[in-house]
Image (tube, helix red, strand yellow):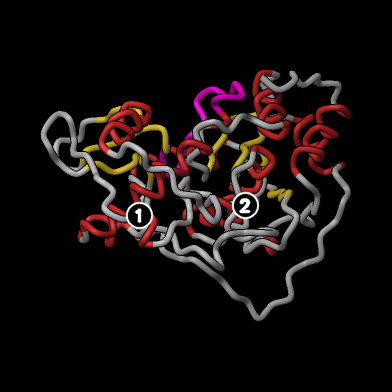
Amino acid sequence: MRMRPTLSWSSTEEPPPGTTDLEPVVEAVRGGGVLVLSGAGISTESGIPDYRGEGGSLSRHTPMTYQDFTADAGARRRYWARSHLGWRTFGRARPNAGHRAVAAFERRGLLTGVITQNVDGLHQAAGSEGAVDLHGRLDRVVCLSCGDLSPRRELAHRLERANEGFAPVAAAMNPDGDADLTDEQVGDFTVVPCAVCGGVLKPDVVFFGEAVPPPRVERCRALVREADALLVLGSSLTVMSGLRFVRQAAEAGTPVLIVNRDATRGDRYAAPRIALPLGAALTTVADRLGIPLPGPA
């Protein structure tokens, strides 16, 4: 099973130029049978930063790897301190116009499914049913010993009690829900164990270097096989976990459309990439199709 460790990509090929013509997306959605694959770019308008787009955090932030988290208690302390602080912001994020448009298309029966690389749960919060969280959900916590799943809010309460007065000022927020803190700010942050067995707790997300569960991958592959078109929204497709579905669609002759402001690793497989902000772009698509969008919740 392909892992998720790739943090950057390069190509000797010049990427195709972007366009601002939304008509191919309008026609694809109008025809139905569209599978959406979304990435971090769809959530930036909800206040969650991107890794690689304009203002992305990858240059200053290396995401936690599964190997470091499981092997090093100090790495877990740093992660949970940063994640606990970041959750206060991340957990308050709300769906934006892009999420609401996807949910509206789904309600009209125009989509066959949604695969998201994000861990924020915002597609579901907007009303999308059955969205596949490829990399898991940050609002759940799993015990690595007994497998117990629990809500993140419960862990947040426990961490608050164990770390009274912990309120450092973070330099920035990151897409995986943690905050930039120095080792001095982390200090002697107390990590709490599983309430069931005392084991090590981990967010129910796929860390870099960790495999996406095979049944989840196969479910996504089945969705790609059934789709009449694949619509990529806000993903650089840098990691293979998402790019493989674009390749699968292209190899099967399924049209691939990409809406992303910056060049992506999948541009060579797609019609010209549409280089527009997602909220405005999807609102325009909805308007042209006569589909009203609900306002912010």
Rate crowding at label 2 as few (under 14), some (14 to 19) or many (20 or more) other CA atoms within 10 Å.
many
Tell me, yes or no, whether the highlighted magenta stretch contains residue 181: no
Residue 74 placement: quadrant: bottom left
The N terminus - image quarter: bottom left
Where does residue 239 sit, x and y in percent of width and height? 50, 60
Q: Nearer the viewer, residue 227 or 162?
A: 162
- Measuring 73% from the left and 31% from the top, which residue is drawn there? 97
Q: Is residue 285 left or right of residue 89?
A: right
- Measuring 50% from the left and 52% from the top, which residue is drawn there? 170
Rate crowding at label 1 as few (under 14), some (14 to 19) or many (20 or more) other CA atoms within 10 Å.
some
Mark toward the start of the polypeptide (1 vs 2): 1
* Residue 197 circle label: none
Amino acid beneath label 1: Val
Please report the bounds of the magenta region as a residue range: 124-137
Where does residue 136 sit, x and y in percent of width and height? 41, 40
The mark lying in front, picked from 1 and 2, is 1
> Is the residue 258 above or below the residue 268 in the image?
above
> Is the residue 176 above or below the residue 264 in the image?
above
Task: Using the rendered image of the protein, determine whether residue 230 is visible from the camera's viewpoint.
Answer: no
Q: Is residue 103 left or right of residue 87?
A: right
Assign a secondary structure to mark 2: loop
Where does residue 104 sit, x and y in percent of width and height? 70, 22
Name the outermost residue toward the bottom.
12
Q: Which residue is mark 2?
A: 235
Q: Is residue 24 left or right of residue 217?
A: right
Amino acid beneath label 2: Ser
- Measuring 87% from the left and 51% from the top, which residue is drawn there? 20
Q: Which residue is mark 1?
A: 186
Q: Nearer the viewer, residue 172 or 250?
A: 172
Distance from disc 1 to disc 2, alpha carbons, whole Å, reads 31 Å
The C terminus - image quarter: top right
